[in-house]
Amino acid sequence: MENFTFYNPTKIIFGRNTQHEVGQEIIKYGKKVLLHYGGGSIKKSGLYDEVMTSLKNSNLEVYELGGVVPNPLLSLVNEGINLCLEKQIDFILAVGGGSVIDSAKAIAGGVKYEGDIWDCYSKGVTLSDALPYGTILTLPATGTEMNFRSVITKDDTLEKRGASFPNPTFSILNAELCATLPNYQVANGIVDMLAHLFERYFTNTKNVDITDRQIEAVMKSIIELGVDVYQDPSDYDKYAQIMWAGTIAHNYSLCVGRETDWATHQIEHELSGMYNVAHGAGLAVLFPNWMKYVYHHDLDRFVQFATRVMNVEPDFFNPEKTALKGIEAVITFYKKLNMPLTLKALGIDEKRIDELALLSTRNNTIKQGNFVKLDTEDIKQILLLSCAGD
Ligand code: NZQ
Ligand code: ZN
């Protein structure tokens, strides 16, 4: 196990009706709040009115910036930064899914940064200061509600990149708010949170049984409850568990002391940046093929995954077969969620594989991943595997 420092300052307010507490939380930070949201789901569901009531009850002065799109754009981030500076906003409240929260993070950082906020995404500039911001999560998936990451797409070049900012001060997690989610978005979220666990589980670090077992428990819970919430997002008791699973899958507590991978996420960001596909759907296509490409690197770990997580009966004479059955079981799970499984199903032109592979390695200047370090040719092979299948 490697040395680590773990610090996660986000206060979590979890449970039924907790959205009504939002005004009381924000008033601790100032009077002027920017309400940031997406394309209108919060207005349809009635959440917008509930939030407004809570903010007004705490005598907050509310400004609004809606219109965040899935795969959120830099142009709206810049609009938000200018609005905050002009109106001298004290606090940003993000109400929505990962895209809205990531956009709010960038605005919060941009208000305190003298340069172009895209520097954080393109040059890895890390900001230690940001305007305080909080979230009401409506789509369990990304884990952004309790972490320091933000992923933004630059409008003109379609580059989709990640950056680090201070965490949200608080996040309100009420699974009742998930009842209005389209089934497809529920499925994207489940695939994404599971992927955050895969990125942590497949590691070269030894003596990490404690986090292995913790990750396995969360993966198993997601697999056991995932199809049920996909079919019925209004099942509070099940979705509340999935919601918390999504948060802990990516709040960095489950990867303490271990190396993580992230190659699949990096490749996926090229797909969703260029083709505007949902992040979860892109991961469903790529992850099984990443697994097929790398499992030889540590067969024992893949056998452990197959038997402990995917309930595969071990074949002691043929560990490779056991490992492959584990990967097949992941695909079977995705099928139950009606996820796309090929690039074609995502609407991606197979002729652009070379270009996507080169983008993933920034024109051969970096490798992706840690479990196995992938160069452009490796990524091309994974993308080719992603063309096949059913
Ligand atoms: O925009 P609205 O109208 O709100 O509709 C959204 C959107 O169309 C809808 N939705 C959300 N909650 C709803 C709802 N519809 C009905 N009822 C509700 N309760 O769902 C659609 C998708 O929302 P989005 O926020 O885009 O999805 P998600 O939460 O999956 O976020 C995806 C983004 O997060 C990034 C992804 O790359 C992608 O850009 N990620 C961020 C991470 C992070 N910051 O740590 C890590 C992840 O790996 C990921 O990269
Ligand atoms: Zn993800």
Image (spheres, grey):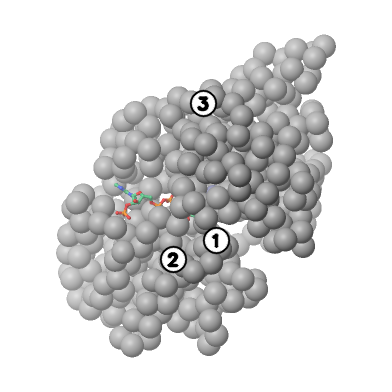
Up/down of 135 relative to 111, above or below: above
**Does label 3 or label 1 sit earlier along the sequence?**
1
Snapshot quadrant of residue 294: top right
Q: Is residue 321 left or right of residue 141?
A: right
Residue type, label 1? Lys
Task: Write the residue at 45% across / 42% down.
Answer: 189
Contact between marks 2 and 3 (CB within 8 A): the answer is no
Q: CA distance from mark 1 to mark 2?
A: 9 Å
Q: Is residue 146 left or right of residue 30?
A: right
Residue type, label 2? Leu
Residue type, label 3? Phe
Q: Which mark is residue 333?
A: 3
**Does label 2 or label 3 sit earlier along the sequence?**
2
Label 2 C-beta lies within 8 Å of the nearest ligand 1 atom = no
Q: Nearer the viewer, mark 3 or mark 1?
A: 1
Task: Write the residue at 71% across / 45% down.
Answer: 379
Crowdedness near tag 1: few (<14), some (14–19) or many (≥20) residues, C-alpha within 10 Å: many
Q: Secondary structure at mark 1?
A: strand
Q: Secondary structure at mark 2?
A: loop
**Does label 1 or label 2 sit earlier along the sequence?**
2
* Residue 326 location (% of width, % of height): 65, 23
* Residue 15 location (% of width, % of height): 33, 47
Q: Is residue 216 left or right of residue 345?
A: right
Label 1 C-beta lies within 8 Å of the nearest ligand 1 atom = yes
Task: Write the residue at 21% across / 49% down.
Answer: 45
Contact between marks 1 and 2 (CB within 8 A): the answer is no
Q: Which mark is residue 160?
A: 1
Crowdedness near tag 3: few (<14), some (14–19) or many (≥20) residues, C-alpha within 10 Å: some
* Residue 152 location (% of width, % of height): 50, 64
Per the image, the residue denoted by label 2 is 73
Using the rendered image of the protein, determine whether residue 387 is visible from the camera's viewpoint.
yes
Up/down of 319 relative to 84, above or below: above
